[in-house]
Amino acid sequence: MGTEKLELLIEGGKAAADQNTAQKLGPLGILQNVIKSVNDKTASFAGMKVPVKVSIDTTTKEFTLDLGTPPIAELIKKELNVQKGSGTPDKQKIGNLSIESIIKIAKMKKDSMHANTLKSA
């Protein structure tokens, strides 16, 4: 038949079968294997949303996972130890990031950014 591709944005270590994944993976019989594998690989990103791309070969029922890095907003919230951002950013500030934290985040996202230098990132 070919290959199926599935793009997910899940909370690290807490992937669950929803309607979209069940429709694509259920008939192949690999739903639980994919969910378990995604949870194992994203356990280190607990509390953050992580983009995951799943490629499934429908004839052999083998799959590969491609993990992305969490969005920058999630990394900033993790550095500041907050649950959500400010509802009114022009009036209410929720924290200050140190230059070291900004550099750490820029290094984490360097591969997915279109910046030539760390300074421009």
Image: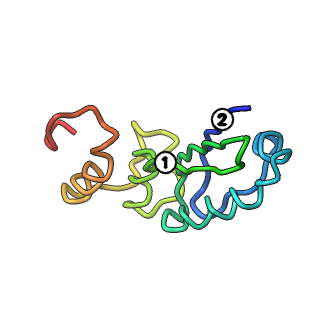
Neighbour tally class for label 1: few under 14, some 14-19, many 20 plus, Cα within 10 Å: some
Q: Residue at x 55, y 62 (%)?
A: 47
Residue under label 2: 3
Quadrant in which the C terminus is drawn? top left
Residue 119 horizontal/vertical position (percent):
13, 41
Residue 118 horizontal/vertical position (percent):
16, 44
Residue under label 1: 85
Q: Is residue 58 above or below residue 33?
A: above
Using residue 70 as the reference point, say whether residue 11 is left or right of it.
right
Quadrant in which the N terminus is drawn? top right
Amino acid type indicated by mark 2? Thr
| Label whose residue precedes the other's in the sequence (1 or 2) | 2
Task: Give 79 or 88, whichever is nearer the viewer.
Answer: 79
**SS assignment at label 1:** loop
Give residue 120's mark: none
Task: Give 60 or 11, whichever is nearer the viewer.
Answer: 60
Using residue 64 as the reference point, say whether residue 103 is left or right of it.
left
Residue 106 horizontal/vertical position (percent):
26, 48
**SS assignment at label 2:** strand
Mark 1–mark 2 Cα distance, whole angstroms, equals 38 Å
Q: Residue at x 37, y 61 (%)?
A: 79
Amino acid type indicated by mark 1? Gly
Q: Residue at x 78, y 46 (%)?
A: 25
